[in-house]
Amino acid sequence: MKNLFLLFLGCCMFSSCGSKKETLTTINREANRSTVNIDPFFDITENAPDDTYGLIGENPVKVGGQSPSNQRRYLASLAGPEGEIVSFNRKGSCCAYKSENGFNGSALVDVYEVTYEGLKKPINIYISFYDLETLYIPKGFTKRM
């Protein structure tokens, strides 16, 4: 009887987790889309020394903080080439790299899709919150005023 109860409980837990997965994903996607109410970093003033900075997974922006809030603050600090307001949406993670601050010596990079008015195709920006380095403005963007 005890084994039957444990089997029933396990099935309930398994099926309830599976059914909630898509709902949580949808909520997270909407929660990550933002254009307002995020305090930007005002001290990001220099253009990236490298054309790939933040634009490929192998050269991510490293915002530190161990929290997505610094990622959003970084993105809120950017504007389009003519000062356009950017909006962004977290697409997922990729591109593991070695980091003492990550899990078991490895960290992932989060991918954000960035758009602004007049942009024909969204631009992916790659950001890690596990490590911190000097923050720059990626090629094709300006500082938010």
Image (cartoon, helix red, strand yellow):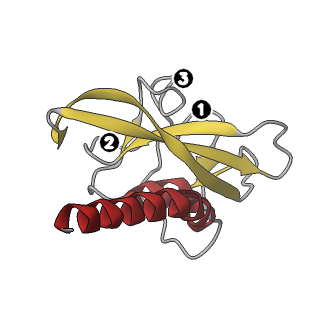
**Label 1 Cα neighbours within 10 Å, binned few <14 / some 14-19 / many ≥20:** some
Q: Separation of disc 2 and disc 1 at Cα?
A: 15 Å
| Camera-nearest residue between 82 and 129 | 129
Amino acid type, residue under disc 2 in the picture: Thr
Q: In what quadrant of the picture does the C terminus appear?
A: bottom right
- Confirm whether residue 77 shows in the render: no
- At 34% from the left edge and 49% from the top edge, which residue is drawn? 63
| Of callouts 2 and 1, the N-terminal one | 2
Q: In which quarter of the image is residue 120?
A: top right
Q: Give above or below for 51 relative to 14.
A: above
Quick check: marks 3 and 1 in contact, CB under 8 Å? yes
Residue where numbered disc 2 is placed: 134
Q: Quadrant of residue 69?
A: bottom left
Residue 131 in the figure: left or right of residue 53 = left
Mark nearer the N terminus (3 vs 2):
3
Residue 23: x and y, percent?
Answer: 59, 64
Mark 3 falls on what kind of element?
A: loop
Q: What residue type is labelled 1?
A: Lys
Q: Label 3, on which residue? A: 51
The x and y percentages for residue 105 are: 15, 32
Q: Distance between the residues labelled 3 and 2?
A: 15 Å
- Which quarter shows the N terminus? bottom left
